[in-house]
Amino acid sequence: MASAGNWIWSDGTEYDPKTAEWSSDDPTNNNNMEYCALINENEQWEDHNCGLRRPYICKWDTRNTEPIIVTQKPPEGECFEGTYKLKDRCYDLRSMAEPKTWIEAHKECQFRSGQLASIHSQGVQGLLSFPLKNIQNDVWIGLSRFGKFDQYYWADGSAVDFTNWALGEPNGPFQQDGDNKVNYCAQLSNNPIYAGKWSDVDCEKENGFICEMPLDTKGNPQPVPYEPCPVKLNYHKYEDSCFRVFTYNSSNANAVADCEEDGAYLPSLGDAYEQAFVGMVMSYFGVDSAWLGMRRGAMGQFQWLDGWPVQYTNWAKGYPIGSNDVLNDCVVMTHEGWRNVNCYSYAHPTVCKITTAPQPPPPDPPSGDCRKGWIAVDDRCFFFDTQNTEVSYVEALVLCQQRGANVFPASSLSREVNTFLQINASAVLDVNKIWLGLFCQDGEFQWNDGSLYYYTNWAGEYPTLPIESNACVQLSTEGSGQWRNSDCFIKAGYVCVAPYDVLSTKASTTGGTTTGQPPPVPTKPKTLSTEAIIGISFGCGGVALITLLAFVSFMYEKHSAKHKRNRIEPIESESNSESGLVPSSPGLDSESRPFNLPPVADESTA
């Protein structure tokens, strides 16, 4: 390993450059990021970043029977003016709006005797994320993928032991060395929907950046990155709200009581920036988890106890779990995300919140009605396809999408809607299960119509693992309409959901109840146009749908060998076929379409 510009052996043996077996291109140090050596397949040495995960060899002296104990002296010192101290590191946030490429930012941080920031805890993640609200750009961190290995590593060589990738990230394709190679580096996204999440982009992009420095014995104590609350002692200000941390463990009921006694509530969190601030304050007080002011309500939806609308969620992978039949109705914030837990069996620290911000008014009811043949429930429209009751999740997705850009397999957002789907799918479709528009990617469940995931009705021990091979979700039409995750290519019925159509004619409605019956559906199939398929593939739903279609493509590739029988043969022209399928056309041939689409039910005369 390298130290102060010189190579040393970790056991203290003197390094002799005359006996070194470096490859012809090494050592390079690669912008002061490569301080460790490995031996390649040609028995030559290469220098690489110390954070790379590679096989290793241990050596011991058989003459020494005493164990080798490595001790490290805790770092001493403080930070310099303009930086913030968190544990044993200093963070300079002053360049978050200063645009530079990743390499330029890396060199600037080294000029300041530091490195681009590495993130190893929720506290650091929060410290670097909540200020994003006050700038317009994304921000570089010290994670990159240079070199010949398809691995991301920190510029300072520390271990990648904490990650906060956005859904579907990292997704930059790995390329071998060449003239046109694109290197990918990690940024903190400033998209309000997932602010602070990591994504990998071309390192030549210009972003702001954050530097990290070690403590210095010449430094002086610096202020914490939050202000005291002007109206409440021991609280810490964030915009129009103030937060206090109680570090001792309490039951949920006692946590609620402690906050109420202090004139506060368990906290509601309105966006990713507020989430980041609370996570950062928790870290300063040495707290890894704390109660949130969220609980499952009477309709099965998770709601904020202070009455604020749920506008943001940050569930940990695989959460929320359970249904109304169990007691895991309270919510805890952890470094991995939110977890719903038993309200009576767990104890955690407490965060309390007071706010002077006015609650947002309830949204105006949507205008318009449902199209003919659709059912109105909960300000949304549902369509029951009686012709195609045995389709895969992918087929259900495409069949719904051909009815409009904002049409998806049904999302069940409350107990009322869940009961409506369960009763009517059983009676009208005569099936024992239907597909929901809920799918899992990277361990996180999400509705493909963009709805927040704050109602669940999982059966028993569901969702089952591994989630990656059971990534789609079905609602049982028996019992209480419970959910089970399953293989996306098994067959089930489906129901489509869409927002109100402002141009539609008045539809049948349940009047807000769960007993409305869908009208009968004619049997004449409707052809699916080439333009509809192209719209599905390239134009519908923005980023969320692109992610979803990437997931669909992945699932198809994964199952293609198993489902070769679904491969479509060349399709006759519409004039020669009554199949209701898309005529073959240039750019959309039989090789590019993953499955036979069933006939599409006609809703126009329903």
Image: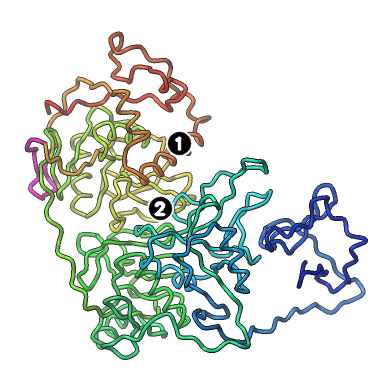
Q: Is residue 296 above or below residue 213?
A: above
For marks 2 and 1, give the CA distance. 22 Å
Which residue in the protein does label 1 denote? 553
Quarter of image, res 238: bottom left
Identify the mark at residue 463; answer none if there is no mark. 2
Residue at the spot 39% in from the left edge and 42% down from the top edge: 548
For residue 521, the mark is none
Residue 28 x/y as whole percent: 75, 57
| Residue type marked 2 | Pro
Residue 176 in the image, given as x and y percentages of width and height: 66, 42
Q: Residues within 10 Å of mark 2 (few under 14, many from 20)?
A: many
The residue depicted at 45 percent of the width and 79 percent of the height is 287
Out of 45 and 439, give the one closest to the viewer: 45
127 part of magenta stretch: no
Point out the stretch of residues depicted in magenta: 504-517
Label 2 vs 1, first from the N-terminus: 2
